[in-house]
Image: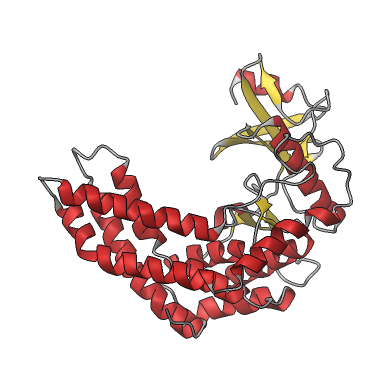
């Protein structure tokens, strides 16, 4: 560990026995257990919101989270000589969720459902009165997620913008021709998904989620899920959930969609595993009306195609890396796989 990180640790009332570098942070063995020191990418207010959430989860019987540790000045963020900002968090000795292991994936799905059961801002048992608020933001509430219709419409406009640019480009390459070849089918799919969303129960789910203060993790993927040794109080593998920095109010099954998509991309949209993931989640938290359709619609939207095209549009177009062509091809192939998956799992057609 570099000297200035050691100086940062001196601001905490813990005894550090050893440290080692890990991805983007420092792993610390202390007299109070394993901790991680990392640069703080959040504001002071966001750190306080995060601390409040994690303390609430602990108070509700879910202690396996990376709660922030206050320094000697009772601050959540420590600075080194007034410049770089750091935060110290509880951590766990375990391994990342292995998406190749079905048991890991299903335990992670059940873990997410357990989190969702207690991730409601209005039910917080710890004090939130100290949280400062902006004039245009609800006093005690975290920010809300983007409305899906707004997101889809924005992506649709951006796809048309990319097409217009490529059409007018004189010297087209492999990427441009490939994009134009598949644009119509991808854009029509995007429009059908957007139209179906308007007639779904999403609007009501979104409104209720914001009003009730239902929270999502915001980045629930295998990197942020640690499988711990031993047996959990639920009988399976103990799980720790980390990196809640992106938590916000939103429709909770969007967390499940994101995790499902990440796993399915590794398994070529294997139907039996996808169905098992949904069932594992529903064992703990049964789906309410309309939630499965929201997962299906978010899955059906050609997001990877849009993302690759949008990245191209905002990049240096003088040289298009071969990787971009591969990503576009993969996006098209995965869209076809996703549609088959949705039709089988959700008995859903657009």
Q: Position of residue 176 (x, y in %)?
A: 19, 53
Can residue 238 be spotted in the picture?
A: no
- All told, the count of numbered labels is 0
Q: Residue at x 66, y 78 (%)?
A: 289
**Outermost left residue:** 171
Q: Position of residue 275 (x, y in %)?
A: 55, 80
Q: Quadrant of residue 183?
A: bottom left
Relative height, residue 187 to residue 122 (above, below): below
Relative height, residue 119 to residue 284 (above, below): above
Please state, as top left, top right, bottom left or bottom right, where the C terminus lies in the image. bottom left
Please state, as top left, top right, bottom left or bottom right, where the N terminus lies in the image. top right
**Which color scheme does this rendered protein use?**
secondary structure
Q: Position of residue 83 (x, y in %)?
A: 61, 17
Q: Is residue 108 left or right of residue 32?
A: left
Q: Position of residue 290 (x, y in %)?
A: 62, 75
Q: Residue at x 17, y 52 (%)?
A: 167
Q: Is residue 316 left or right of residue 55?
A: left
Can residue 280 be spotted in the picture?
A: yes
**Front-lying residue, 350 or 123:** 350
Q: Residue at x 69, y 32 (%)?
A: 87
Relative height, residue 141 to residue 13 (above, below): below
């Amino acid at each position: 560990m570099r000297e200035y990180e050691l100086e940062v640790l001196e601001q905490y009332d813990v005894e550090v026995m050893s440290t080692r570098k890990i991805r983007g942070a420092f792993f610390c063995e202390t007299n109070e257990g394993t901790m991680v020191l990392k640069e703080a990418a959040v504001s002071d207010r966001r750190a306080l919101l995060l601390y409040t959430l994690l303390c609430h989860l602990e108070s509700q019987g879910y202690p396996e989270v990376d709660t922030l540790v206050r320094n000697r000045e009772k601050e959540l963020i420590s600075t080194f000589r007034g410049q770089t900002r750091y935060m110290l968090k509880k951590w766990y000795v375990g391994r990342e969720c292995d998406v190749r292991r079905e048991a890991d994936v299903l335990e992670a799905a059940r873990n997410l459902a357990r989190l969702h059961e207690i991730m409601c801002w209005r039910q917080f048992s710890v004090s939130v009165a100290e949280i400062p608020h902006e004039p245009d933001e609800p006093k005690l509430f975290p920010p809300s997620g983007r409305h899906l219709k707004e997101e889809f419409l924005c992506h649709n406009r951006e796809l048309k913008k990319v097409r217009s640019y490529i059409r007018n480009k004189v010297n087209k390459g492999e990427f441009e021709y490939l994009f134009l070849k598949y644009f119509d089918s991808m854009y029509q799919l995007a429009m059908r998904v957007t139209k179906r969303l308007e007639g779904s129960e999403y609007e009501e789910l979104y409104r209720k989620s914001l009003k009730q203060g239902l929270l999502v993790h915001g980045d629930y993927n295998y990197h942020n899920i640690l499988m711990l040794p031993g047996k959990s109080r639920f009988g399976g593998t103990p799980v720790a959930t980390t990196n809640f920095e992106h938590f916000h109010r939103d429709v909770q099954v969007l967390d499940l969609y994101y995790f499902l998509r990440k796993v399915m991309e590794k398994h070529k949209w294997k139907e039996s595993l996808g169905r098992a993931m949904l069932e594992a989640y529903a064992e703990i938290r049964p789906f309410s009306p309309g939630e499965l359709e929201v997962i299906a619609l978010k899955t059906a939207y050609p997001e990877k195609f849009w993302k690759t095209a949008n990245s191209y549009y905002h990049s240096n177009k003088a040289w298009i890396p071969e990787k971009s062509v591969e990503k576009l091809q993969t996006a098209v192939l995965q869209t076809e796989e996703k549609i088959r998956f949705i039709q089988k799992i959700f008995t859903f057609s657009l």
